[in-house]
Amino acid sequence: MVTELVKSDNQYQTAFRSVRESSPTVPWVELVRSGAIDRFEQIGFPSVRDEEWKYTNLALLAKEGFQPAVAPVEFADANIARFAYPETKNAHLVVVNGFLREDLSTKIGLDQIVVIDLFSAVADARYNKIARKYLARNANYHDNGVRALNTAFLQSGVFLWIPKNVKLETPLQITFVSDGRSLSFPRLLVVAEENSSATLIENFVSHADEGHFTNAIAEIVLKDGARFEHCRLQNENKNVFHVATTAAELGRASSYDITSVNLGARLARHDVSVVMDQEGAECWVDGLYVAGANQHTDTHSVIDHKLPNCTSHQLYKGILDGNARAVFNGKIFVREGAQKTDAMQTNKNLLLSPQARVDTKPQLEIYADDVKCAHGAAVGQLDEEELFYLQARGLNPELGRSLLTYGFAEEVIGKIKIDSIRSQLDEAVLTRLHTRLEA
Amino acid sequence: MLEIRNLHAAIDGNQILKGINLTVRKGEVHAIMGPNGSGKSTLAKVLAGHPQYEVTAGEVLYEGRNLLEMPPDERAREGVFMAFQYPIEVPGVSNAQFLRLAYNEKRKHHGEEELDPLEFKDLLKERAKVVEMDASFMSRSVNEGFSGGEKKRNEILQMAVLEPKLAVLDETDSGLDIDALRVVAGGVNQLLTPENAIIVVTHYQRLLNYIVPHYVHVLAGGRIAREGGKELALELEEKGYDWITSVASHQAEARWAEPSLGSSVFLRVCAVNRNAAIGKVTSSSAGAE
């Protein structure tokens, strides 16, 4: 049904034509874009008939009529720096409605790396080879209409290149902010060369309270021995649709550590995938989702062990209140010959209200025989004995519940190494609980 | 300070306490002893206000107020403290955070100003000496990954911070080696003042070598079967609980008739009996064979 609506409406075709006219590009990118819009025309938005979208219904989107953001807008926010953290205030990129805004960005201490508009990188002789090799390689748009749409509308975004052996000391932050009732297509391509290391914070926020649709893709390529820490924060307003993909490819003995925190949006869907097709790679794919009344949050994760001696760790935690709905689907593949794989996956959910609901499905598919794999999921309420213990120390039941919930979240929040993010998240979780208690 | 009158309590419909009478005054140390299943831990939990236990009759006055009407957190803020037999792990919440929160809740309750993290840190450092606890324990999650002995020490640290008027130590000696026992007991002794009181619940006399009680009460079948001074504990050590429990053996037999839980409790009683009084066959242990 969604597909039909999209086809008859055809606003995307019209918007696409205007993008092609206003933002011409190099032939190979033209090809990618037109291939993607064709693919979108064929498959449209995913529907609940699709197994991967069984619990997350995008039908509501059709009614919203968000307009594709095809050109940069006037954006006046004198206080855009408020979205930066003290640790990142000098290395803060701002992307408005999917368009990188150099005028709002601060790039101090980033001389060793390249961080520029992705759309100019694809046409830049210095970087186009890298971009051509890796753009749209890990975020496959053939099986996913949302990704196809993002790919078709490529006309800005961020290209981040960390050269060989460069150890970036300053954490880099990219703030993605939306303005107006727009459908934006933030896009990020990261290529970290051999033995480099860096920390990136992606921060998705809203400028105002009106709804918008964020359709974001981040592709991350780590070459041999590269180390990359990635903190992804989504705290958009409660009217937002946020559908995003993070796709990483890990080189030999590289290490990728992502912590993904979802607090905002009315509907949030995050597809995160890590492909390990070199030996000795290690990844941490962790996350926290906190959802309250009328919020829906969905994480689909794929960790693919293709070659031997790779290690993956995954801990996802969810706190659900009101009539919140959550979905966690975590697949781990251990391919034939991927011996000595070590894979550990856990999803734990805390339900604070009888109306909250979670569908969790950890899946392990193993085609090798010498591996160490474990997975598990738990859904529960606060432990009565723990609550009594806190009460027996003088904490009233409300405070006790807040503290236990905070402690539950802390296992994920605590691993974020940037202090001010950690304390902001602590506060956000506690405030959330407080609001609930007062309501 | 504390007056327990004809206290009856049940869990899941099983009557455990069947009429306890006990008076505790300031500056006193009382030991509650008794075999497994006699109700001594139940008594501790009822005093702390554990929601699973139902008081079916009797009353408890604490400083003249009806203790049973107060929710557990209010009891704590009013100065009642129970050291748990099995301290609970609270993942993600640091010991220091937790202690400061508890400490400040009590201060607020009494109309005093809260301490900020720095002020509290000094206080905590001071109190930690009581149980010889390393500073590294303060940043770790409450009881998480602590050894049995560390958990018990942490309970006494909480007691040192919260300065209760009435402390109930529920089998604080269980699972402790002799060195840890000495530290824990030493901590408790440092905290004893003429203004507070301590109830020590224990199975063995061992702890009472370190925390010397003024009174010993022996529970059997949910009642106080015998009372005396500290020498009663020594007598028990020598003669075993049979000496007391034979009086209450008809109650044990009644439990034996119940399936599952009742019988396992009963078997443990028998095992203790045998260890304590070799060669002596009582009516209850004969029933087990």
Image: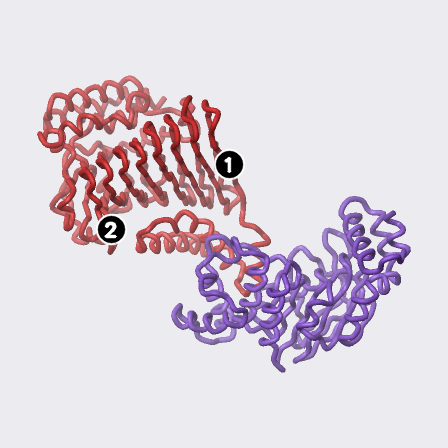
Three-letter amino acid code at the position of disc 1: Gly
Q: Residues within 10 Å of mark 2 (few under 14, many from 20)?
A: some
The residue mark sitting in front, 2 or 1, is: 1
Query: Which residue is identified by label 2?
Result: A83
Nearer to the camera, B276 or A435: B276
Nearer to the camera, A328 or A16: A328
Q: Which mark is residue A321?
A: none
Name the secondary structure under disc 2. Answer: helix
Chain letter, colour red: A
Q: Left or right? Give the position of A152 relative to A431.
A: left
Q: Left or right? Give the position of A178 relative to B76.
A: left
* Image quadrant in which you'd find residue B148: bottom right
Query: Which residue is identified by label 1?
Result: A376
Colour of the chain lettered B? purple
- Residue A393, given in percent of the width and then of the height, sits at 55, 64
Q: Left or right? Give the position of B117 relative to A221.
A: right
Colouring chosen for the image of the structure:
by chain
